[in-house]
Image: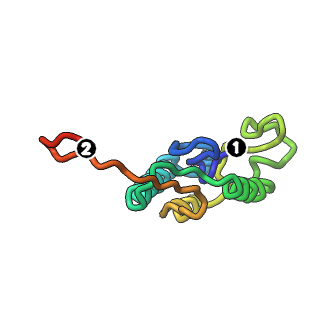
Amino acid sequence: MAYRGTAVTGFPNLFFLVGPNTGLGHNSIIFMIEAQVQYVMDALAHMDAAAATRVEVKPDAQRAYNEHIQRKLAMTVWNTGGCSSWYLDRNGRNATIWPDFTFRFRSQTRRFDPQAYEVTATERVRSPEPGLAPA
């Protein structure tokens, strides 16, 4: 599972679009992609401002986020009704559909939330000025 459908514990500096639980049965996926792009761009700006070289979502943040998503999905048409659904894996887990209004996803991804991540800043090595030999 992923955090905000965009980052996964164990894969630092990896952000992706249209990840788990960002699919829609009621709106445009383009809306979700735009929200994720905003989130990633804000993450990159945060990394630059903090001189960070590494960000990785914390396991607890990812777990809590996914538990919340699965609770919201529990009573949706995609998870109930006694029908087999291609949205459900063999364990009955839905890793496909976003279970809420799209404006809520946009709100969650409007700003990068660094408290959910391990952010590692290391000293950056400055390049020598043009024409000067490195020390």
Identify which residue is drawn at 78% across, 43% down: 93
The residue that label 2 is drawn on is 135
Identify which residue is drawn at 62% across, 52% down: 3
The residue that label 1 is drawn on is 95
- Residue 129 rendering spot, x and y as whole percentages: 17, 47
Amino acid type, residue under disc 2 in the picture? Ala
Name, please, the residue furthest toward the left: 131
Label 2: few (<14), some (14–19) or many (≥20) C-alpha neighbours in 10 Å: few
Name, please, the residue furthest toward the right: 82
Identify which residue is drawn at 76% across, 53% down: 70
What whole-number distance in Å separates the C-alpha atoms at marks 2 and 1? 52 Å
- Residue 30 rendering spot, x and y as whole percentages: 47, 47
Residue 39, compared with residue 131, is above or below; it is: below
Task: Evaluate whether residue 125 shows in this view.
Answer: yes
> Going by the image, does 92 lie left or right of 48?
right
Residue 38, compared with residue 9, is above or below; it is: below
Task: Choose between 23 and 49: the one closer to the eye.
Answer: 49
Instruction: Give the SS element for disc 1.
Output: loop
Coloring applied to the structure:
rainbow
